Amino acid sequence: MLTHYIEIRVRPDPEFSESMLLGALFSKLHRALADLQSNSIGVSFPQYSLKPKTLGNTLRIHADPAMLDKLSNTGWLRGMRDHVQINEMMHIPETAEYRTLSRKQFKTNVERLRRRRMKRKGESYEEACAYIPDTVERRSDLPFICLRSQSNGNTFLQFIELGTPQAEPIPGQFNTYGLSTTATVPWF
């Protein structure tokens, strides 16, 4: 049950952008959640906004006190402490709403899709273009975090979709990014 949270705010830095530091913080959290094999820790971005498109500079990590302590004891913030301000563990306000925060994937690069089809189907570029027109490509209006894959080193954008407000929490499991399509996190 998500009863408590820790708030981590990225500090301004002349050498690194806010979004770069938030991405590094989120990557470290992902690795820690994967190592813990946890599915009971959710995240939120209280400054989430579509206009302007941003996640802001604050990450909240939601869980029960025992799980937050377990996460803290992993040392996952090593190397980030100079770049962030960490608040003490706090209880979720009783007035909080609840929302899902989930990963949303888009077919954002038509050329990549065509190259992939050519490789998988043995088609020519013209055949792949006929099957995958330019209109397939979509641009997202959602805020995102730029991450680097641990398996292949490629950089990718993880778009974050905010669900509609719920009066009551909906329990469920979170992935190793602290996101879920069904389980809600407190929103305040």
Image (spheres, rainbow, N blue to C red):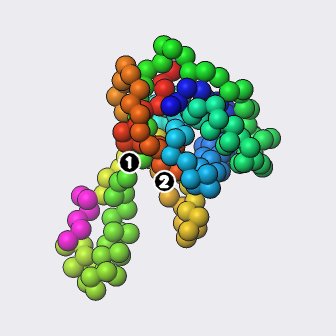
Q: Is residue 144 above or below residue 46?
A: below
Judged by its main secondary structure, the magenta piece is helix
Judged left or right of residue 57, residue 172 is: left
- Residue 183 showing in the rendered view: yes
How far across and how far down the image is residue 24, in percent? 65, 49
Residue at horizontal 61 percent and vertical 29 percent from the top: 5
For label 1, the SS is strand
Nearest the viewer among 102 and 109 is 102
Residue that extends furthest to the front in the rendered view of this protein: 66
Q: Residue at x 35, y 76 (%)?
A: 115
**In the rendered view, would you say 181 is above or below 3?**
below
For the residue pair 1 and 92, the one nearer the viewer reads as 1
Q: Residues within 10 Å of mark 1 (few under 14, many from 20)?
A: some
Q: Secondary structure at mark 2?
A: strand
Mark found first going from the N terminus, 1 or 2: 1
Residue 102 at what x, y percent from top left? 41, 42
Q: Is residue 124 visible?
A: no
Magenta segment, which residues? 131-136
| Magenta stretch: includes residue 17 | no
Residue 104 is tagged as: 1
Determine whether, in the image, residue 135 is placed left or right of residue 183: left
Using residue 166 as the reference point, say whether residue 38 is left or right of it.
Answer: right
Front-most of residues 124 and 91: 91
What residue does disc 2 label? 157
* 10 Å crowding of disc 2: few (<14), some (14-19), many (20+): some
Q: Position of residue 82 (x, y in %)?
A: 80, 41
Q: Residue at x 38, y 69 (%)?
A: 112
Q: Name which residue type carries label 1.
A: Lys
Classify residue 170 by image quadrant.
top left
